[in-house]
Amino acid sequence: MKRKLILKNFCIVDEDSDFIGSVVVEDGLISNVIHQPYIDDADQIIEGHGLTLMPAFVDLHAHFRDPGFPEKETLESASLAAAAGGYGTVVCMANTKPVTDTVEKALALKNRSDNLGLIDLYPVLSLTKNMDGKELSGITALDTKQNTIRMLSEDGRDVADDSIFLAAFAEARRLGIPVSCHCDAGGPEADAAKKAGKGREMWSRIEENVAVKRAIELGKKMGAHVHIAHVSTKESVNMIREAKRQLSRADASSSYSLTCEATPHHIALTEDDAHALGDESYGRVNPSLRSEEDRRAIIEAILDGTIDAIATDHAPHSETDKAGGAPGFTGLETGFAVSFTELTGEGSALENSITVDRKTIDLKRLSFLMSANPARILGLADRGRIAAGLRADLVIADTEALWTVKSEPFKSRGKNSPFRGRTLQGKILLTLHGGCIVYDTRS
Ligand SMILES: [Zn+2]
């Protein structure tokens, strides 16, 4: 006997629909999507009462710190945080201890995650052994038929040697998966700015701009899929926009492609916030929080389609590490609300709202950026939208709810949120993973 769950009379939103209806879930999959008011027998019925039902989010960029840094996060705490934030699929970076640089290490992590059953985890494999930039990692041993590794990345380092970077791009092309380029590695120009005593805001901007240009050039040369992580400067936005324009006119047979992501904190915050939080402590992140002009350029790029996805770059730290200047913010549990408040304009009436831009996107577009398109970038055709036959990875959200961020209740061990004390709009109430409830605030 199939177990049947009906999510009844919800406001159903995905990248191309927004209507009142019901969703039937059987055996972990969406078995039916119904546009009329709906009455039927089921093992379980969840009444919508006007709440919003969306596909669970797909995060292209998170740091789970496992193995190696239990004081910051564990696989379990990160997965609980992801479920609480409405994420059903998470790509996690390889800068663990040891570095995830072999297929075996990646599979071990994936198996542990599958046993927890809270999210679908896709471990990233580093480009080089131990991320030392010298010799290719286990990517050379990856079979083209494998489906566990869906993204490669050297995290914040990229690879200094062009020939090794190109060899890694060649492997990515062979496997048909993207290389996430973090583009905050140094270079002679940035080093010179550092030596000349320029501030971080100056040299870290040069670092990003130089690295984005290089990643695009090398990826194009090798015909690989380049994915630029956490775009934060107006110059890199412009470079990506122009490269995409050229790409649309390029030879269709080329395997080169280009996508990019922005983070909720770069969408919502600026260097003024970093300063208020502490430039070298609670406001520290790579890439740095930039100027208001940069922030607006990111929003423009979301509006015109240059930016393909919103990714959290969830980077949990212990209080001691964060106070000591460790870069990064915990982000899984605020990703949706920050993006919704900032981008849909719903939050503009709030007293301490972070919204300053009047141009907005609708919830369908936000669903595209947080679910459907990141799933596409990973080549996952079975999720990210609401349709019969797809996985029942779903979230129930109250888009009217206002809440003030406090980090103590976070499931994540990382309490280092730059949004503490802010009032946000939009709250995740329930998360379904493969048809099972993995997070529920209703009880
Ligand atoms: Zn990162």
Image: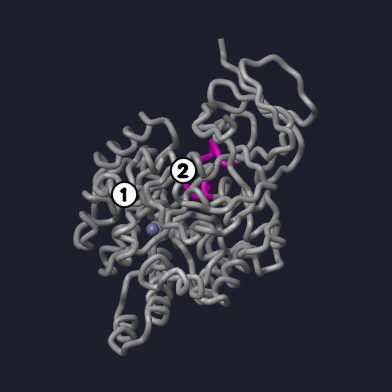
**Whether residue 436 is situated above or below residue 278 in the rendered picture:** above
At a point 63% along the width and 64% down the height, the residue shown is: 352
Would residue 380 be counted in the magenta stretch? Answer: yes
Would residue 138 be counted in the magenta stretch? Answer: no
Assess mark 1: CB under 8 A from ligand 1? no
Is residue 2 toward the left or the right of residue 139 in the image? right
Q: Amino acid at mark 2?
A: Ala
**Whether residue 122 is situated above or below residue 350 in the rendered picture:** above
In magenta, the rendered stretch is: 374-384
At a point 56% along the width and 40% down the height, the residue shown is: 56
**Residue on which disc 2 sits:** 82
| Label at residue 37 | none
Nearest the viewer among 23 and 420 is 420
**Residue on which disc 1 sits:** 65
Query: Magenta span: helix, strand or loop, mainly?
Result: loop
Q: Position of residue 151 (x, y in %)?
A: 39, 50
Q: Position of residue 83 (x, y in %)?
A: 48, 39
**Whether residue 17 is situated above or below residue 360 in the rendered picture:** above
Q: Quadrant of ligand 1?
A: bottom left
Q: Amino acid at mark 1?
A: Arg
Nearest the viewer among 150 and 57 is 57
Q: Is residue 298 visible?
A: yes
Q: Position of residue 197 (x, y in %)?
A: 32, 88
Q: How is the image coloured?
A: one colour
User: Does dot 1 land on a helix, a strand or a loop?
Assistant: loop
Is residue 247 toward the left or the right of residue 113 in the image? right
